[in-house]
Amino acid sequence: MPHITIKLYPGKTEEQKESLSKAIVSDIMEIMGNSEASVSVAFEEVEPEQWKEVYREEILPKMDSLYKKPGYNPL
């Protein structure tokens, strides 16, 4: 705990994903006090034409609990 899932468009390199994953784990360890072994990070690639589904199903219903809200509305 915690497990972080990042949804993004395809096209980022494995090196970019690895770098972001390391930065996230480092920040969680520093800010939240978790051990490295307790953190997991996953990436799920979503095609641009499917992003409306992510927004409609995962972002919009949780808008009140988002600490960083998106600056766009694809609907």
Image: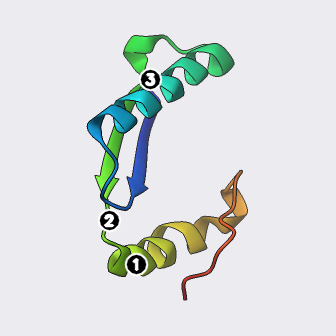
Q: Which amino acid, mark 1? A: Glu
Quadrant showing the N terminus = top left
Does residue 66 appear left or right of residue 9 in this picture? right
Real-space CA distance between mark 1 and mark 2, rounded to the nearest whole angstrom: 10 Å
How far across and down, in percent of the image, does residue 26 sit?
54, 18
Q: Which residue is mark 2?
A: 46
Label 2: how many residues lie within 10 Å, few (<14), some (14-19) or many (20+)? Answer: some
* Residue occupying the point 50% across, 73% down: 55
The image quadrant that residue 4 belongs to is top left
How far across and down, in percent of the image, does residue 43 sit?
33, 46
Give the SS element for disc 1.
helix
User: Where is 28 relative to 46, above or below?
Assistant: above
For the residue pair 61 and 28, the one nearer the viewer reads as 28
Q: Which residue is mark 1?
A: 53
* Residue occupying the point 34% across, 81% down: 49
Q: Which residue is mark 3?
A: 22
Q: Which amino acid, mark 3? A: Lys
How far across and down, in percent of the image, does residue 17 sit?
36, 37
Q: Which amino acid, mark 2? A: Val
Give the SS element for disc 2.
loop
The image quadrant that residue 14 belongs to is top left
Real-space CA distance between mark 1 and mark 3, rounded to the nearest whole angstrom: 28 Å
Dot 1 and dot 2 residues touching (CB under 8 Å):
yes
How far across and down, in percent of the image, does residue 19 sit?
42, 28
Label 1: how many residues lie within 10 Å, few (<14), some (14-19) or many (20+)? Answer: some
Residue at the extreme bottom of the image, as rendered: 75
